[in-house]
């Protein structure tokens, strides 16, 4: 709409899409796996299970900044299909909406544990390099860590990334980074959706990452501070060669996990020298020990999406609170995009190389 009835500054595609390089002809229905990706065009196709459906769309994060967009699918015989593109290289996720009911694309073997109707696909390119798999045998390892939660009164699981060449007997313990998920998610999401392993692997191989251990625990609890300090942290220290020195510990999270991170900062200033919150604000200033935070924190870095991120107003209000209190922090401006994984992947890409270097 902004291009109508005025001289447009350019005739290129909208953000998130590349210019056409030629005509694209999708394959015949039923002949290829779905989604079919070629030349950065993506063709979605249903099975024949929905041949009697009245209305089918694909809902994907293909709009600018990773916003979700519903694309109508057209009937092709006893299947439904839609083609979009060319898309920028990145990591994408989607689900099918059939007569207003969400379904997974059962032809796509990818899965998201906390979102059973989601599927994913990846478009390679320089822009998405840090989200791609590194060559086999060159990256770090992701292992499951089972720990007892005295908050949930149950055994729980964390995923732990160790860097290439991790030495359990190294004389100097490794720095440790506790990375938390958001609401409605769990310990699997940073690996399945956040591409944390790929990001950490690439940064390490590029020489930008201090060798560290990254612990992705389960933050779904009524008392996160207790869960973290009495359950997750002791279990990680018992299993891995990691430091207990506050200057060698980092804590960050997205959305709910970012709020939990700020809660730990306020309750235990200096316990983690590196703190970051993605799409989560500082909240109120009552009872905050500003001197303890400033003296004990080497890095407090804040991130948020643009105005389409629903926490944006409260986040900006939190920055005002921090300014008024005198809390030292870093904020380099919004990350274009909504309250979603495109933003949080970019936040982790920015944050990880900054840890344990001050």
Image: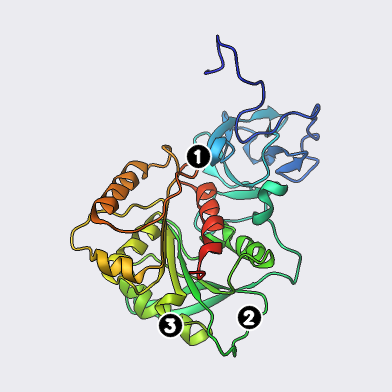
Dot 1: element:
strand
* Residue named by callout 3: 244
* Front-lying residue, 298 or 58: 298
Residue name at image x 64 percent, y 46 percent:
90
* Residue named by callout 1: 101
- Where residue 331 appears, as percent x and y from the top left, is 42, 51
Dot 2: element:
loop
* Residue named by callout 2: 166
Dot 3: element:
loop
Residue name at image x 27 percent, y 70 percent:
292
- Sequence-earlier tag: 2 or 1: 1
- Sequence-earlier tag: 3 or 2: 2
- Where residue 33 appears, as percent x and y from the top left, is 75, 46
Distance in Å between CA atoms under marks 3 and 2: 17 Å
Distance in Å between CA atoms under marks 3 and 1: 48 Å
- Cβ atoms at labels 3 and 1 below 8 Å apart: no
Q: From what the image shows, is residue 322 above or below residue 271?
A: above
- Cβ atoms at labels 2 and 1 below 8 Å apart: no
- Sequence-earlier tag: 3 or 1: 1
The answer to which quarter of the image holds residue 142 is bottom right
- Within 10 Å of disc 3 (Cα), the crowding (few <14, some 14-19, many 20+) is some
Q: From what the image shows, is residue 84 above or below residue 5?
A: below
* Front-lying residue, 302 or 187: 302
- Where residue 256 appears, as percent x and y from the top left, is 37, 57
- Cβ atoms at labels 3 and 2 below 8 Å apart: no
């Amino acid at each position: 709409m902004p291009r109508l009835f005025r001289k447009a500054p350019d005739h290129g595609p909208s953000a998130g899409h590349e210019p056409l390089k030629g005509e694209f002809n999708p394959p015949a229905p039923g002949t290829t796996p779905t989604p079919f990706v070629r030349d950065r065009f993506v063709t979605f196709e249903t099975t024949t299970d929905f041949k009697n459906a009245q209305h089918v769309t694909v809902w994907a994060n293909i709009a600018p900044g990773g916003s979700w967009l519903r694309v109508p699918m057209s009937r092709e015989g006893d299947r439904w299909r839609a083609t979009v593109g060319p898309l920028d290289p990145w990591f994408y996720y989607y689900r099918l909406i059939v007569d207003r009911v969400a379904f997974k694309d059962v032809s796509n073997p990818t899965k998201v544990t906390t979102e059973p109707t989601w599927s994913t696909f990846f478009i390679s390119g320089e822009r998405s390099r840090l989200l791609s798999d590194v060559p086999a045998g060159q990256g770090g390892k992701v292992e499951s860590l089972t720990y007892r939660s005295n908050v949930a009164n149950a055994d729980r699981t964390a995923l732990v990334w160790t860097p290439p060449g991790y030495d359990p007997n190294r004389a100097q313990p490794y720095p440790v980074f506790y990375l938390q998920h958001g609401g409605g998610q769990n310990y699997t999401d940073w690996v399945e959706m956040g591409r944390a392993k790929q990001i950490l692997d690439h940064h390490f191989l590029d020489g930008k990452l201090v060798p560290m251990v990254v612990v992705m625990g389960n933050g779904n609890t009524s008392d996160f501070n207790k869960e973290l300090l009495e359950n997750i942290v002791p279990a990680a220290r018992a299993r891995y060669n990691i430091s207990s020195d506050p200057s060698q510990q980092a804590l960050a999270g997205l959305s709910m996990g970012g709020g939990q991170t700020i809660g730990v900062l306020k309750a235990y200033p200096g316990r983690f020298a590196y703190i970051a919150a993605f799409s989560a604000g500082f909240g109120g200033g009552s009872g905050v020990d500003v001197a303890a935070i400033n003296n004990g924190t080497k890095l407090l870095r804040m991130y948020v999406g643009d105005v389409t991120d629903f926490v944006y107003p409260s986040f900006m209000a939190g920055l005002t609170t921090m300014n008024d209190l005198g809390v030292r922090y870093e904020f380099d401006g919004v990350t274009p995009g909504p309250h979603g994984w495109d933003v949080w992947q970019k936040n982790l890409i920015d944050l990880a190389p900054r840890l344990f270097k001050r």
